[in-house]
Amino acid sequence: MKVGVVTFPGTLDDRDAARAATNVGTEAVSLWHGDADLKGVDAVILPGGFSYGDYLRCGAISRFAPVMEKIIDAANGGMPLLGICNGFQVLCEAHLLPGALTRNHQLHFLCRDQKLEITNNSTAWTTSFAVGQEIVIPLKNGEGSFQCDDATLAKLEGEGRIIARYVGENPNGSRNKIAGITNERGNVVGLMPHPEHAIDTLTGPTADGLGFFTSVLTAMVK
Amino acid sequence: MAKIVVDVMLKPEILDPQGVAVSAALPRLGFNFAKSVRQGKRFEIEVDGEPTPAQLAEVEKAAEKLLANPVIETFTVRVEK
Amino acid sequence: MALDTVATAQATPDQRQPFAELGLKPDEYARIKEILKRRPTSSELAMYSVMWSEHCSYKSSKVHLKQFGDKAVKTDALLVGIGENAGVVDVGQGYAVTFKIESHNHPSFIEPYQGAATGVGGIVRDILTMGARPIAVMDPLRFGPADAPDTHRVLPGVIAGIGGYGNCLGLPNIGGEVVFDETYLGNPLVNALCVGVMKHSDIKLAKAAGAGNLVVLYGAKTGGDGIGGVSVLASETFESTGPAKRPAVQVGDPFVEKVLIECSLEIFSEDLVVGIQDLGGAGLSCATSELASGGSGGMKVELDRVPLRDTSLSPEEILMSESQERMCAIVEPKHIARFLEICKKWDVTVTVIGEVTDGDRLEITWHGDLIVDVPPRTVAHEGPVYNRPLAKPEYIDRVNTEVVNVKLPESTEEIKAAVLKLAGTPNLADKSWVTSQYDRYVQGNTIQSQPDDSGMVRIDEKTHLGVAVATDANANWSYLNPYEGAKLALAEAARNIATAGAKPLAVTNCLNFGSPEDPGVMWQFAESVRGLADGCLEMGLPVTGGNVSFYNQTGSVAILPTPVIGVLGVIDDVRTRTPMSFDRAGLDLYLLGETQNDIAGSEWAYIHGQRGGSAPIPDLKREMRLIEVLVAGRTEKIFTAAHDLSQGGLSATLTEMVLRHGVGAKVTLENVGVALISETPGRVVVAIDSSKANRLSELAKSKDIKLYKIGTTGGDALVINDTVISLDELRKAHTETFTKLFG
């Protein structure tokens, strides 16, 4: 089972995502932004970071990378695709997911151990969780406020496409405390917090993040 | 040579925390004229000669595709002498 | 303006030159003419003026810093010592770790965000230049009073700048300090530390060896950033009544630096460079003269080949530019194609600008005209050396005899009030407002970060080998006794490494002082360096390098002497580290180390307006024995937790321990006022399972360290004798300070 991890110029958490994937027994394959080649992977992760320095808008330039064409095609064909933080931003810019991520309302970069509630466990990346399960994984970003128009919000809520919500105080002003969403098919997931930084208690607040990576293992086996 | 200016602003319904911060800072500095402040982006694009309608249409397309994110932003295109 | 070539200089020996405006003294100008046997060209004058400035040449500090080399303990662990961009230490398993602190004080006062950001950028490049992958950053910061308007201008910008740059580089911020004191109003201290790791075989040095090898400039294009910043900013004080200085401050782009790091590491991994230097203060002037000096001695550079952001720059300006994110490599011709290929992959601008020659001159041409022809060592290493006059300032004897007149808490109410007051005072309050703006998780190897005693990073994911870093300074003590003050800071940083069970290995330093032209300041500096050098020799810790920042003063008022000491340690298995605090009830609490009446220079004295008295006298032999107890205690799994005592004494330590995991404690203290408030060095609070009591007692006795049982863990309050402080109340006092101050 191969999971592709994309590196754009400025990507930071690619090695951490690869570590998490390897940790659960999948093979992490490095994918270069400039090569339109998915190397036969079964799933793809767009990791966190500051691709292109967040120039113009976060993820605005990355979405046009050669590798993204192949990724968009594969995702439209059902391939599991996870966008973490900057990756989520790329997915929204690429219109694989609705809405957009904007500047944190309190205007500061915020790094904290964030409690989330999993609200959808039927996506490719969340089957290892129970609906209503609370997990703690690190949140670390400056542009994490999920925004969309009322119609989109109603659709997301109505179709149960919100996969995780912030528990407690809203850390960044996201509408309806949305921390992560999925597409209609349930194979593309965008998540603002970082599961790859919660894979053991030696280096993270919990090991709750592993669930995202074990889920896709199951999804790929199917 | 002419300059085409694209102004990009967040849609009115999107909270603009930077604009809010600026409007809070102004009175602290003794400036009390502002009812509200919103912050946007301005692109200045230099082209050879006078821009044709076709060129301006291209700029509009570029603004729609790259310079602005239509999900949360609006834009205007104009020529500056 | 006509180009001032070597030929022109030879032909017009009496042409008046603005050497004074560039910061050179008449005798220094005369010396340049002597070296060159003619007047310098304007480009050469620019080079000498920046390279001979205080910040670059260390002219006022060299004679004193020599002690670090002279008094250095002989150790095989030091792979690269003072003189290179950063020191390198062997940490075992074939790994070498490099670390260094640098200052960016003046720029941060002028433009807080960019000053701090480019400070981080600069130190990271220094580490990269050694051939290492940067793995973490820390930032010791000092500001004016927390409620001063100018602190509100400077602090948020500095924090945002450090976060903005460091986070974008993908470097976890694993610790630092935030200290407030009137002394820093107008002269904030922004010191930045970076740690990097590599295999022994990867170590790179700044030498241009091998005639015919190519000089390659890569990274950002050159613009007008910080022109004259080095010689103007770091070598003059800010006049309190003069007009505000607004010279060109450097503007950084962390994305360009991130790409530069990845590109460079790929180049290093294929062994494509013979020597490398980053362009920091003094830009190209520094890189070319240092590389040439470090190698065979000869280099030819075509300055017009330097890629420019601003094509209006003159050759002098190009040589002085401090545009960020640039590196200079020496590459053998057989490797240049691959070098260029890797730069292209990462979209990094790269240009061959010259070659190494077998002469002993640095020659720079501009469109074919020779504009610089100098012996490089005279620029980079043989700058002026001053033996500045020293004079013990009159305040020392006067303040040392002052009696600290401050009431210590006695009654139940006074104890509660004191503990809450210390918990909430800005210097001791919870710093999450600051640290939550930094990414501590990126790279996935952070084991400890703020508010732990040291930052700790795992460097091998299989063996779990790790390094720990701590920085400390105590300006109050350095003010009272600069010699002992430096030793005390060294001991504290080393102790902070040891509480987690890591073994201190090497030292770096950032020495922040006022004007070296003030004999009193120079005396403070000389004493601090002497104290640090003596202390390092006694503790067996080599100084691997560091930084001096002079001229931190407004008018004639210098800052309190603030030598910041950084200590690096190693731990064989990060999984066995001793955590800072306990997460369960029923453990026994002990205090290691004896408490004396050391109120002078304490936080309690400071908040009561008392700055006088005598600093404690450190006992470094005893500190070393304490370190042995802490390291052995980890290996033998005696300690469940260990946290050192420093500013705020036992009160602060207990506060931090109970709030860390929300588990209270009940302690009984004799002479409670002194016990809680005193800042006697060489003390640590440990929590142990009662089954380990005998072993702890034996260990402490064997190392002649006093041991006192003070209480037990548990409950939802901090109980000191009869005083009960609920954790909720304590947490509120501790955590609301920064939010109230900075929003």
Image: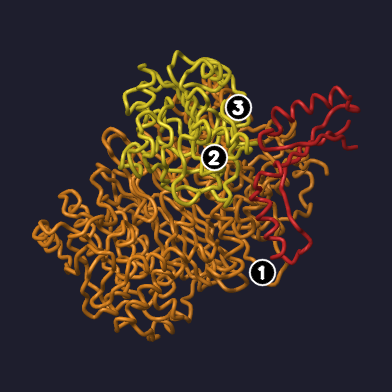
Chain colours: A yellow, B red, C orange
* Element on which disc 3 rests: loop
From the viewer's perspective, tell me whether residue A61 is left or right of residue C741: right
**Are labels 3 and 2 on one chain?**
no
Vertically, is C492 above or below B57? below
Dot 3: few (<14), some (14–19), or many (≥20) neighbours within 10 Å?
Answer: some
Establish whether labels 3 and 1 are both on one chain. no
Q: Is residue C695 visible?
A: yes
Q: Please, which chain is the residue tagged with disc 3 on?
A: A
Circle 2 residue: C278
The image shows residue A26 at horizontal and vertical percentages of: 35, 22
Q: Which residue is mark 1?
A: C239
Residue under pointer 3: A95
Alpha carbons under labels 1 and 2: distance apart: 32 Å
Residue B81 horizontal side relative to residue C228, left or right: right
For label 1, the crowd category at 10 Å Cα-Cα, with few meaning under 14, some 14 to 19 and many 20 or more, is: few
**Residue at position x 34%, y 52% from top?**
C542
> Looking at the image, which residue is at 39% across and 24% down?
A216
Calculate the distance from the C-alpha at mark 3 to the C-alpha at mark 2.
41 Å
Subunit that carries the residue with mark 1: C
Instruction: Find the distance from the CA under tag 3 to the CA under tag 1.
Output: 56 Å
Query: Around disc 2, counting alpha carbons within 10 Å, would you say few (fewer than 14), some (14 to 19), or many (20 or more)?
Result: many
Share a chain, discs 1 and 2?
Answer: yes
- Give the residue type at disc 2: Asp
Residue sitting farthest toward the top: A40
**Image quarter of residue A211:** top left
Q: Toward the viewer: C144 or A56? A: A56
Helix, strand or loop for disc 1: loop
Residue A23, percent from left and from top = 32, 29
Residue C527 appears in the picture as rendered: no
Question: In front: C236, or C111?
Answer: C111
Residue C591 coordinates in the image, percent (x, y): 21, 67
Callout 2: chain: C
